[in-house]
Each structure stands twice: as C-alpha cells, then as structure tokens.
Amino acid sequence: MSSDIAGECSYCRTCIGIGERWVREKVFGTEFDGGSATYEWYHADVFAGQERSCWEKHELERETARMSRAA
Ligand SMILES: [Zn+2]
C-alpha cells in the first residue's frame, strides 16, 4: 500500500479511491492523546447529484461552528 493513496474520507466514511481527488487536513491532537498530529482525508470531488464535495461540506460545517461560537 502506497502512501500516495488516501484513506477513508472523514466526512462520508467511505474509502477514497485511486484517481479520486482528495484533501488532506492535518489535525493537531489534544493533550489527551499526547498532542500528536493526525491526518484526515476528505473527498475533493463533487459526487453526482451533490452540490459540494465532502471537503467543502466539512469546511462549511467548521465555519458554521465557528460562527455559532462567536455569536
Ligand atoms: Zn467523502
């Protein structure tokens, strides 16, 4: 297994296939898990019938969460 191949999409929980576009996000760990960074993968391709890719939906959710905290 090559490191070029992404793992499972953290948004839709399905595997990202070879040749599919993806976004890798570095996630910094908390004190509880020793502070080690991990990576999460998201589909960057927009699936048929969808308006946004998994990555865009993830970004949108994060933005919404940030706005609700600030409010
Ligand atoms: Zn996905």
Image: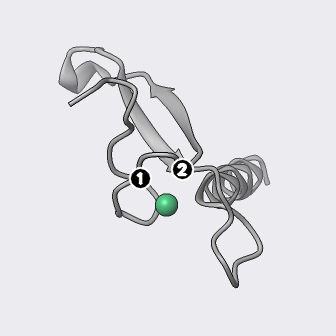
Nearest the eye: 53 or 66: 53
- Give the residue type at disc 2: Glu
- Quarter assignment of residue 1: top left
- Give the residue type at disc 1: Ile
Pointer 1 residue: 16
How far, Cα to Cα, is label 2 from label 1?
7 Å
Residue drawn at the location 67% of the way across and 79% of the way down? 48
Pointer 2 residue: 20
- Badge 2 vs badge 1, beta-carbon distance below 8 Å: yes
The image shows residue 5 at horizontal and vertical percentages of 37, 35
Q: Quadrant of the C terminus?
A: bottom right
User: On screen, 44 above or below 24?
Assistant: below
Q: Is residue 41 left or right of residue 34?
A: right
- The circle drawn on residue 60 is none
- Neighbourhood count class around disc 1 (C-alpha, 10 Å): few under 14, some 14–19, many 20 upward: many
The image shows residue 28 at horizontal and vertical percentages of 42, 22
User: On screen, 19 above or below 50?
Assistant: above
Nearest the eye: 3 or 9: 3
Residue extending farthest to the front is: 19
